[in-house]
Amino acid sequence: MPSLRETKNRIKTVKNTEKITKAMKMVAASKLRRAQDAVTKPRGFAAKLQELISSLALLAETASVETHPLLIDRPAKKAAMLIALTSDRGLCGALNSSVVRMVQRFVVDQEEVFSRIDVSAIGKKGFEGLSRLGFPIAERYEPPDKIYDLAFAKTIAEEMCDKFLGHQYDAVFLVFNHFKSAITQEVVVEQLLPVIRKPVEEQPIDFIYEPGQMALLDALVPRHFSTRLYQAFLESFASEQGARMTAMDNATRNAKEMNEKLTLQYNRARQAAITKELMEIIGGAEAL
């Protein structure tokens, strides 16, 4: 049975924890509002860009023109790159551990398809989690700022495109948290290379392109890669803030409940101590 002083110190600690978690929840909620706006803005552009690439690729095939190399699905799949996108900070529930588990599952499921799967990490938590499990990290990317930017995504995209064109990898995949709402995040695996073409329901109109269809594909396909990667950065950042807000809300609620239990325990112990002291005084008076 803890003493009154120990119980009082525990109550004080729990109250301070409740204040800290409540403040962290408010900070995460503020960041989440900005992150939600940032997530929704590029979605339309990315969808239209993919639609344009699909139309150009279909027209090129119809005209018996060679398909862009970043769109070719190679039949012989030897090596693949799997990029795990996580956060640099914790206190966001199972957000990062879910990505690590998805990497494990993907490697097991695809080991018969690819002879080698290399794993790269974007984010401190993903790197630490994968390293603990014994995964050799091929590349560790560290963003220059706290919030990812398009230039960072473009750098990774150019490197991956060069390795794909050099046949170092036959496919590039990305594991990240897709943002659905403030309380819902879904871990997804998305193929970045070769670029998946969106199904075209109708035959696209064959416009006159300047400088040409293949020249446009040379410019648009790498841009689509970097845009999709940047979109994943925004999705992951918004998911992180939503998960942290939920985790801090649960922590605040748990601290409040613990504080109530400890306060009740303290009051009972104090009442028992007072009763015992009164009984000793009464017993001493009767003895006299």
Image (cartoon, rainbow, N blue to C red):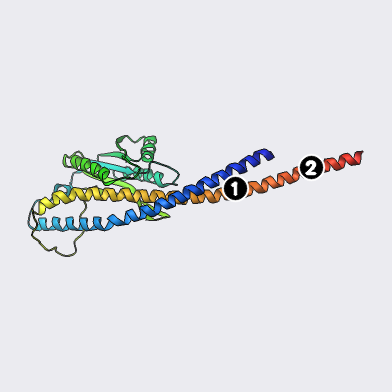
> Could you say where residue 280 lies in the image, as x and y percent from the top left?
83, 40
* Mark 1 secondary-structure assignment: helix
Q: Which residue is found at the position 15% from the left and 58% from the top?
A: 55
Residue named by callout 2: 276
Look at the picture and state if 129 lies above or below 25.
Answer: above
125 sits to left or right of 259: left
* Mark 2 secondary-structure assignment: helix
> Could you say where residue 149 lies in the image, as x and y percent from the top left?
29, 46
Residue named by callout 1: 258
102 and 129: which is toward the camera: 129
Label 2 neighbour load within 10 Å: few <14, some 14-19, many 20+: few
Is residue 201 visible in the rendered image? The answer is yes
Residue positioned most to the right: 288
204 and 181: which is toward the camera: 181
| Residue 107 - label | none
Q: Amino acid at mark 1?
A: Met
Of the two numbered discs 2 and 1 on the same chain, state the one appearing first in sequence.
1
> Could you say where residue 138 lies in the image, as x and y percent from the top left?
28, 35
Label 1 neighbour load within 10 Å: few <14, some 14-19, many 20+: some
Is residue 111 visible in the rendered image? The answer is no
